[in-house]
Image (cartoon, rainbow, N blue to C red):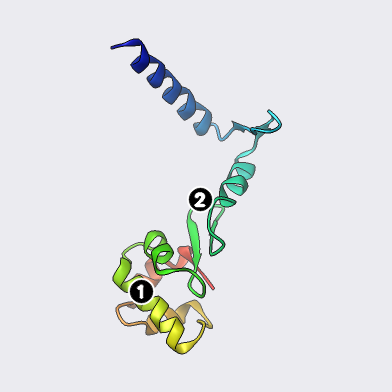
Amino acid sequence: MNREMKKGIIALLLACAVSAHGVLAAPSTGRTLTAKENVQSASVKLSETEKITTSGSIQVSINSASAEELAQALNGVGMKKAQAIVSYREENGPFKTIDDLRQVPGMGNSLVERNLSHLKL
């Protein structure tokens, strides 16, 4: 094993150890962040239609997310179903409840139930 590989492995192990403890250094201040602050700072990097919940899952807005964002965030939803959600929204106006998503062709009860924790209006 060469020296560069050893350095890479050590850096990876250190990053994993720091991540496992939920503590990272804030780049501008040098102070350590709590796990909650890490989640909050990470959510800044998401689009305006997405947020990270306290459980760490991504929530996406069915009223404003693009098809790409929906397909990425929802379990069992590919681009075809995600585009159907966007098309339904464009034709019928914004969803009034999350349950209205069941009216979209291809979005059955079990698929909506499976993704409830990932959905918001």
Residue at (53%, 64%) from the top-left corner? Answer: 49
Determine whether, in the image, residue 86 is placed left or right of residue 30.
left
Q: Position of residue 62 (x, y in %)?
A: 48, 73
Q: Nearer the viewer, mark 2 or mark 1?
A: 1
For residue 112, the mark is none
Label 2 SS: loop
- Residue 20's place in the image compared with 107, above or below, is above
Q: Residue furthest bottom?
A: 92
Amino acid type, mark 2: Gly
Q: For residue 5, which quarter of the picture?
A: top left
Residue at (54%, 31%) from the top-left corner? Answer: 21
- The tag earlier along the polypeptide, 2 or 1, is 2
Label 1 SS: helix
Q: Position of residue 55 (x, y in %)?
A: 52, 52
Residue that numbered label 1 is attached to: 83
Category of crowding for the residue at label 2, using alpha-carbon neighbours closer than 10 angstroms: few (below 14), some (14–19), many (at least 20): few
Determine whether, in the image, residue 62 is placed left or right of residue 80.
right
For residue 56, the mark is 2
Quadrant holding the C terminus: bottom right
Amino acid type, mark 1: Gln
Marks 2/1 in contact by CB < 8 Å: the verdict is no
- Residue 119's place in the image compared with 72, above or below, is below
- Residue 54's place in the image compared with 98, above or below, is above
Determine whether, in the image, residue 57 is placed left or right of residue 106.
right
- Residue 8's place in the image compared with 37, above or below, is above
Q: Position of residue 7 (x, y in %)?
A: 41, 16
Between 94 and 115, the one lying in front of the other is 94
Structural distance between the alpha carbons of marks 2 and 1: 25 Å
Between 48 and 40, the one lying in front of the other is 48
